[in-house]
Image (spheres, coloured by chain):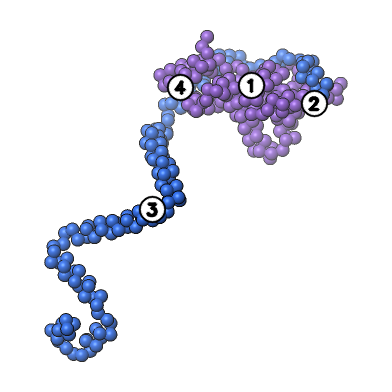
């Protein structure tokens, strides 16, 4: 199996760049897709954002600094692309209001043709969609993707203490939501 | 605090499975679709981008020289202004000399001498003197004799 370092070296070499890039897409496509999908809660949007993420990686590979780690760099680009998409949607479609944006995300879950969860899973996704943006990100990354706080610090450029606090608040709010609908 | 640690240590009891799906064959075709976009990008690189790429090393070099010049010339002017003022005067003088040589390069010696004496002579006239001479109804020879004496 090719290591991340080997992929980076090959990406920076013009003769091996295209082959290495295909390998990069193959290695990270699913992990990044699910990360993006949980943020935007819509398959078509997630597909667009994922493609843009990889195009951005292709364009900026020369400026990549190895010390940040390929995996955290990719996650950071995917997260930024997803948040930029949501912010643009919020400004253009909803005039910048958070409430309407939350309604849009909830509607995405309820009308998603590719949602195959049971009732509890749907309620959990709805509870997550109601969370503030940062708490939503941290909860998804920690609870579903098992990403370490140490890596999350680099991806979200936030201290581990603040991330733990965000996760704690998110869990509390989700528990409260479940209690309120019982 | 205790409660917070409990939540962080013990996983909350929410369902953990992934309830989302993707259209059939989505991941299998993804590499080809992204690959096609990359190929388009490589093939249709705009002429401006190509020119920028070609000029990049030259522009980089020019920028380095500009920065080096600023880093050396500016502090010199700031910390030793007398030296810079002197060198500025010298530069002005040498520029004047260069301009003079350029202007007189193709003029023969006699014309140059005449031009110089004409300039010198004209500076010696006083306007009152010229008016007096013109109003005295003297001929050219007499006027010349007057000036010489």
Q: Is residue B85 left or right of residue A176?
A: left
* Contact? badges 1 and 3 (CB < 8 Å): no
Disc 2: which chain?
Answer: A
Q: Quadrant of residue A158?
A: top right
The furthest residue to the bottom: B136
Are labels 2 and 3 on one chain?
no
Image point (49%, 25%), residue name: A61
Q: Drawn colour of chain B?
A: blue
Chain identifier matching the purple colour in the rendered picture: A
What separation in Å lies between label 1 and label 3 (alpha carbons)? Answer: 57 Å
Q: Which mark is residue A173?
A: 2
Disc 4 versus disc 3: nearer the observer: 3
Query: Dot 1 surroundings within 10 Å: few (below 14), some, or many (20 or more)?
Result: some
For the residue labelled by badge 4, is the local secondary structure a helix, a strand or a loop?
loop
State the image coordinates of residue A125 (x, y, percent, origin top left).
74, 22
Q: Which mark is residue A151?
A: 1
Q: Is residue B141 left or right of residue B99?
A: left
What separation in Å lies between label 2 and label 3 (alpha carbons)? Answer: 72 Å
Disc 1 versus disc 2: nearer the observer: 1
For the residue labelled by badge 3, is the local secondary structure a helix, a strand or a loop?
helix
Are labels 1 and 4 on one chain?
yes
Disc 4: which chain?
Answer: A
Q: Which mark is residue B83?
A: 3
Counting labels gives 4
Disc 1: which chain?
Answer: A
* Contact? badges 1 and 4 (CB < 8 Å): no
Are labels 1 and 3 on one chain?
no
């Amino acid at each position: 199996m090719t290591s991340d370092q080997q992929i980076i070296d090959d990406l920076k070499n013009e003769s091996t760049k295209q082959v290495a890039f295909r390998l990069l897409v193959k290695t990270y496509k699913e992990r990044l897709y699910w990360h993006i999908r949980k943020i935007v809660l819509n398959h078509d949007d997630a597909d667009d954002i994922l493609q843009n993420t990889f195009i951005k990686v292709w364009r900026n590979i020369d400026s990549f600094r190895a010390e940040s780690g390929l995996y955290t760099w990719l996650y950071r680009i995917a997260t930024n692309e997803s948040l930029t998409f949501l912010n643009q949607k919020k400004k253009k479609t909803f005039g910048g209001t958070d409430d309407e944006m939350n309604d849009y995300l909830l509607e995405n879950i309820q009308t998603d043709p590719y949602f195959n969860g049971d009732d509890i899973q749907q309620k959990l996704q709805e509870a997550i969609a109601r969370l503030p943006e940062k708490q939503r990100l941290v909860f998804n990354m920690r609870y579903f993707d098992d990403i370490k706080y140490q890596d999350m610090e680099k991806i979200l450029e936030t201290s581990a203490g603040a991330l733990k606090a965000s996760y704690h608040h998110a869990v509390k709010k989700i528990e409260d939501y479940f209690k309120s609908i019982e | 605090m205790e409660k917070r640690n409990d939540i962080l240590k013990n996983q909350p009891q929410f369902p953990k499975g992934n309830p989302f799906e993707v259209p059939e064959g989505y991941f299998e075709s993804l590499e080809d679709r992204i690959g096609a976009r990359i190929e388009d990008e490589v093939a249709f690189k705009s002429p401006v981008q190509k020119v920028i790429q070609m000029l990049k090393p030259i522009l980089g070099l020019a920028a380095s020289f500009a920065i080096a010049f600023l880093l050396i010339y500016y502090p010199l002017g700031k910390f030793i202004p007398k030296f810079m003022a002197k060198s500025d005067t010298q530069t002005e003088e040498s520029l004047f000399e260069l301009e003079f040589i350029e202007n007189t390069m193709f003029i023969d010696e006699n014309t140059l001498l005449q031009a110089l004496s004409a300039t010198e002579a004209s500076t010696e006239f006083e306007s009152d003197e010229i008016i007096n001479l013109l109003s005295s109804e003297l001929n050219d020879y007499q006027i010349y004799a007057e000036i010489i004496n």
